[in-house]
């Protein structure tokens, strides 16, 4: 059974990003050029995956999450 990848029209997936089978990318998400999303990864909405970040198969990431960027507070 082959799962279809779905990318919402408002999402940005940059050239170079690697998407596994059955990935779901919700509204207003941004996937950077060095990001790797495994099979069946589900980005709900307003998710940013940037840098050299790999997300494992079957992971669900909920809204307003940012992975792979430097933290906003370095304390």
Image (cartoon, helix red, strand yellow):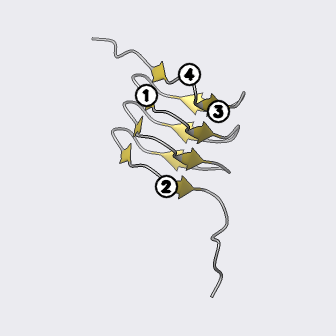
| Labelled disc at residue 9 | 4
Residue 67 location (% of width, % of height): 55, 55
Is 46 above or below relative to 9?
Answer: below
Residue at the disc numbered 2? 65
Alpha carbon distance from label 1 to label 4: 14 Å
Q: Horizontal placement of 10 versus 43: left or right?
A: right
Residue 73 location (% of width, % of height): 63, 79
The mark nearer the N terminus, 4 or 3, is 4
Alpha carbon distance from label 1 to label 3: 12 Å
Q: Nearer the viewer, residue 29 or 5?
A: 29
Taking the view exactly as shown, the residue that stands out farthest to the top is 1
| Labelled disc at residue 23 | 1
| Identity of the residue drawn at 50% across and 37% down | 37
Q: Secondary structure at mark 3?
A: loop
Alpha carbon distance from label 4 to label 3: 16 Å
Residue at the disc numbered 3? 17
């Amino acid at each position: 059974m082959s799962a279809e990848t779905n990318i919402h029209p408002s999402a940005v997936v940059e050239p170079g990003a690697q998407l596994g089978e059955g990935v779901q990318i919700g509204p207003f998400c941004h996937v950077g050029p060095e990001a790797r999303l495994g099979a069946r990864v589900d980005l709900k909405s307003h998710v940013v995956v940037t840098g050299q970040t790999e997300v494992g198969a079957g992971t669900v990431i909920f809204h307003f999450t940012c992975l792979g960027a430097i933290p906003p507070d370095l304390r």
